[in-house]
Image (cartoon, rainbow, N blue to C red):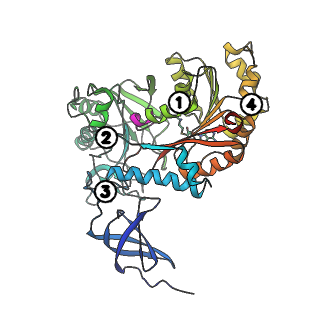
Amino acid sequence: MEYSKYQKNDIVTVTIEDIGNDGEGIGKIDGYTLFVKDAIIGDMAEVRITKCKKNYGYARMEKVLIPSSFRVEPKCKLHRQCGGCQIQAMDYKRQLVYKQDKVRNNLLRIGGFTEEQIDAATEPIIGMDEPWHYRNKAQYPVGYDKNGNLITGFYAGRTHDIIANTDCALGAPENKDILEAVLEYMKENHVPAYREKEGTGLVRHVLIRTGFRSGEIMVCLVINGKKLPGEERLVEKLLEVKFPENGESVSAGQKTIRDGAVHKKLVSVSVSVNTEKTNVIMGKEIRVLWGKDRILDALGGINFEISPLSFYQVNPLQTEKLYGLALDYAGLTGKETVWDLYCGIGTISLFMARKAKQVYGVEIIPEAIADAKENARNNGIDNVQFIVGKAEEVLPQFYAGRNMSKALVENASYESGKDEERTVDEQMRHPDVIVVDPPRKGCDEKCLETMLAMQPERIVYVSCDSATLARDLKVLCGGGYELKRVRAVDQFGHSVHVETVVMLSHKKTTA
Ligand code: SAH
């Protein structure tokens, strides 16, 4: 057996020539590949080897000898320790190129498409105008540092050690003052933080959500108990926090939305009871201490009510662009029947419903479907119907014609079951467009199979993992579809994640 010529703790000099899947730098020394966390493509660096395999190893950055032209001064001093940002030291424009390349490579290698096919379909990635302070939601763990000081911040990458940081460059700027008010309240009232190992103490997490359009702010403390001591004093402290008015120190990312006209205001303070020894952050029970139990926000002109437990996209500005693109790719004229699989709280369904004849949304989580129905009602959108269940079970059932009557009873306007040409059953079995927005693992085989059998004219695939996207596209394009349009959208600047929207059309339509 051949052993690597390098050993753990060796210090070597390497030039970084590529970027790996997790944002790490990749370089070679005499044909031996090294994966170096925090190294930027173009860097020449001194690195310490941390793990050796026969043909490749891992290393840690010790010193940048010649910095890459893509290296920038990161905004956050803690970016290397924190698990949130992987590529903050890379110029944002280069980050976008990296993300677009990642999608392209996956379509080539996993999807089996040719360069010509990909290039003909691909449109340039949609980046953020302002890649800072774009998140509308943050969950900060509360705990103690090594010296026993009360802190809040972020988990270090892959651990549950808390790094004290109330000033995250991706979160809403007012979070800092809110967190400091919470810590002050805890100190003054001797409220202990939760100790994860022992399962003792009280305050586990602070959840903050901001409606970027409405300016409404929600603070929810997750506690290992039923009650906080002096709850009214927490509320008093939070009400003392001064929020920026009319654009004053509002982050640029949020300003873009309403030209700085967002009045930030606290509207909801609550606790969530979570006494389980678990990694799940939120408890099921929410108790309002002050104000409303939810905040209002809007996406693409549709209003959403968001409770502490609701799912809601974390980058509203880019979500509008992402779903706007999906809507564009769907090519709706008002006559179409659309299935929206993996519909969550129905955001895409509601976007589509305004341009389609009828939309059917399918989602596995009943609470999300309850939110989706309420969102449809609140916005006066009645040509959409939501179904709880697994996409890979619901779709085949409808295709086989087994669930039709149930759907018709639920939706009174469809009782007659007829339109000019096709019955509702036929329209459901053979929709014009199917949209999917699955989690990272992609679509189930049975789901893809049924989509192929239904033969919609167009399939719009919204994906948060371009590897599983490429895998699924291979199946769909092997079954009669053609790759027409591909476009990446950056939802999470400074992380390695990228969203992609793809449009396929059936060969019979394009022939
Ligand atoms: N478009 C949605 C978000 C999609 S995220 C929105 O804007 O709200 C992916 C969704 O797929 C999640 O809500 C998840 O609960 C759901 N999901 C996961 N597996 C599923 C399955 N097998 N069938 C249906 N939905 C599923």
Question: How far is the residue under mark 1 from the one under mark 4?
Answer: 24 Å
Q: Quadrant of residue 224?
A: top left
Question: How far is the residue under mark 3 from the one under mark 4?
Answer: 49 Å
**Marks 3 and 1, the one that precedes in the sequence:** 3
- Please identify, in this view, whether the residue under mark 2 or under mark 4 is nearer the observer: 2
**Marks 3 and 4, the one that precedes in the sequence:** 3
Report the residue marked by disc 1.
Answer: 327
**Marks 2 and 3, the one that precedes in the sequence:** 3
Ligand 1: quadrant of the figure: top right
Q: Looking at the picture, which amino acid does disc 3 mark?
A: Ala
Report the residue marked by disc 2.
Answer: 130
| 316 in the magenta segment | yes
Question: How far is the residue under mark 1 from the one under mark 2?
Answer: 24 Å
The answer to whether any part of residue 495 appears in the image is no
Q: Check contact, mark 3 vs mark 1: CB within 8 A.
A: no
Q: Which residues are magenta?
A: 313-319
Q: Position of residue 122 (x, y in %)?
A: 51, 45
Q: Which element carries disc 2, helix, strand or loop?
A: loop
Q: Is residue 386 left or right of residue 430?
A: left
Q: Residues within 10 Å of mark 1 (few under 14, many from 20)?
A: many
Q: Which element carries disc 3, helix, strand or loop?
A: loop
Q: Position of residue 467 (x, y in %)?
A: 56, 53
Question: How far is the residue under mark 2 from the one under mark 4?
Answer: 44 Å
Of 358 and 268, which appears nearest the observer? 358
Q: Which element carries disc 1, helix, strand or loop?
A: helix
Q: Residue at x 63, y 45 (%)?
A: 443
